[in-house]
Amino acid sequence: MKYYKNNSKEMQTSIYILPRENYFIPLKLVEIDSLFLPGKAALIKVIPLSLFDRDDLQFWPYTHDGVYSVKSGYRLLMEQEEMELAVTFTGGANSKVWKAIWSMRVPNRVRTLLWRAGTNSLPTKVNLVRRRVLTKDVCLVCMA
């Protein structure tokens, strides 16, 4: 994705900030407009600047030591996916659907089947692989 007009590989906004003054140099604002695409230039100009003169610190907030690992990234994605599924199937516009399902005059096993299908909790091959019950997602008929 391109954010700036010239072909430079890296642009740093820190060269446009007065040290210890924490505001953009007014004459340099025109230069920001000339270097960056209009939308990105506008975003740069509204960056809130720190009151403290400190170097930035990189950390990953999802581990105890602040260091990113593939495991922690994967865990975060899995948690987000589960939360999205829970939100999708428990509230909002779907609540009327769930009320209708639970108030149907059908055997409990039918309601339970509809609920498990709606919450993607049926033991399908995809779900079993996702939950690590199975290790391979291969069709036994066509081996694909």
Image (cartoon, grey):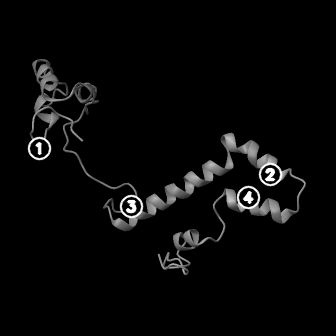
Q: Quadrant of residue 134?
A: bottom right
Residue drawn at (56%, 54%) of the image: 83
Per the model, the C-alpha gap separating discs 2 and 1 is: 56 Å
* Residue kind at label 3, given as amino acid type: Gly
In the displayed structure, 85 sits above or below 131; it is above
Instruction: Report x, y in % for residue 95.
Output: 72, 44
In terms of secondary structure, where does tag 2 sit? helix
User: Mark number for residue 93?
Assistant: none
User: Mark number for residue 115?
Assistant: 4
Per the model, the C-alpha gap separating discs 1 and 4 is: 52 Å
In terms of secondary structure, where does tag 1 sit? loop
* Residue kind at label 1, given as amino acid type: Lys
- Residue labelled with disc 3: 73
Q: Are marks 2 and 4 in contact (CB under 8 Å)?
A: yes
- Residue labelled with disc 2: 101
Instruction: Report x, y in % for residue 89.
Output: 66, 51
Residue drawn at (69%, 60%) of the image: 117
Residue nearer the viewer, 78 or 98: 98
Point out the tag, 3 or 1, that comes first from the N-terminus.
Answer: 1
